[in-house]
Image (cartoon, rainbow, N blue to C red):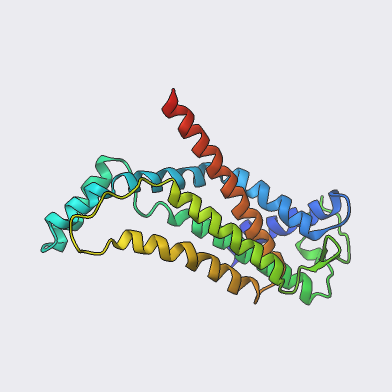
């Protein structure tokens, strides 16, 4: 797609090559790490809004359950009342989708870049470069002289999965504790949270051991950045409550 190529793929391609030229050591893995950090800084407002929205939704859980219980026999009325509740508290249950979509877009772009360089004999395509970006010719695909970024790496995939686990766990710990149940009905929100705590890391590991290590490195860096971001937001929230 021309839109994807011109607005996402080519700028990212040039940024990676520029950083590969600029940073000492000619390490494409380091270029991926720095690029990921830069992207994360640019997208901080989007991810901050996602985290805040998730926290608001958790705070609304008692009211959401109350509406669901009150209109359990009238799904149309239930949906309408839930939408009114979200509108009243200025939150959107689907706001968490945007950051995931953005993450996926950049993941696909990096995968295509690694595939392109690899299939081109580890040579940068001059046709993709802007006039102000120097062509380094051959790319050194080894990260810290050990990991081939064009091939799967179990070690980096494992670290990415572990980081995903702790990032999800931290997000869950930041959520309000559920009230004691007064009925025998299962708490589907709690069940889903527990499943995502393990399902996310497992999927990260499976994908990581099947695709180029450059993707796992991108995902690991991105997850660690989000983990630090959540810790900072948590610290600020605690400081605000004390004040």
Q: Which quadrant of the rendered structure holds the N terminus?
A: bottom right
Image quadrant in which you'd find residue 154? bottom right
Q: Position of residue 234 (x, y in %)?
A: 49, 39
**Image point (47%, 50%), residue name:** 171
- Image quadrant occupied by the C terminus: top left
Q: Nearer the viewer, residue 156 or 114?
A: 156
| Residue 95 appears anywhere in the view | yes
Q: Quadrant of residue 77?
A: bottom left
Residue at horizontal 66 percent and vertical 67 percent from the top: 157
Q: Is residue 65 above or below residue 236?
A: below
- Name the foreground residue: 67 vs 167: 167
Where residue 216 appears, as percent x and y from the top left, is: 66, 65
User: Looking at the picture, how far across and down is residue 36, in whole percent?
Assistant: 67, 53
145 left or right of 52?
Answer: right
Seen in the picture, residue 210 relative to 23 is either above or below; the reply is below
The residue lying at 57 percent from left, 46 percent from top is 43
Image position of 4 (left or right of 217): left
Lateral position of residue 24 relative to residue 85, left or right: right
**For the point 20% across and 57% down, which residue is it?**
79
**Percent from the top left, x then y, of residue 122?**
83, 71
> What is the tally of numbered marks visible in this picture?
0
Between 170 and 34, the residue placed more toward the observer is: 170
Judge whether residue 110 can be spotted in this image: no
């Amino acid at each position: 797609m021309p839109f994807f190529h011109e607005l996402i793929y080519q700028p990212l391609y040039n940024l990676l090559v520029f950083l590969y030229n600029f940073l000492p050591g000619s390490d494409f893995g380091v270029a991926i790490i720095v690029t990921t950090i830069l992207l994360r800084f640019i997208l901080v407002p989007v991810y901050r809004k996602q985290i805040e929205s998730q926290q608001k939704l958790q705070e609304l859980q008692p009211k959401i359950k109350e509406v669901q219980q009150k209109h359990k026999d009238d799904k149309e009325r239930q949906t309408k009342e839930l939408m009114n509740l979200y509108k009243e508290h200025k939150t959107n249950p689907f706001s968490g989708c945007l950051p995931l979509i953005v993450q996926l877009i950049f993941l696909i772009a990096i995968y295509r870049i690694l595939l392109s360089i690899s299939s081109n004999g580890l040579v940068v395509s001059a046709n993709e470069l802007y006039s102000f970006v120097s062509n380094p010719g051959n790319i050194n695909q080894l990260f810290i002289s050990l990991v081939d970024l064009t091939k799967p790496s179990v070690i980096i995939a494992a670290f990415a999965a572990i980081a995903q686990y702790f990032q999800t766990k931290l997000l869950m710990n930041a959520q309000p504790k559920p009230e004691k149940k007064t009925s025998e009905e299962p708490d589907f929100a709690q069940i889903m949270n527990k499943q995502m705590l393990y399902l996310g890391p497992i999927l990260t590991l499976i994908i990581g051991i099947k695709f180029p290590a450059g993707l796992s490195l991108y995902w690991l860096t991105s997850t660690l950045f989000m983990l630090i971001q959540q810790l900072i937001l948590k610290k600020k929230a605690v400081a605000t409550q004390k004040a």
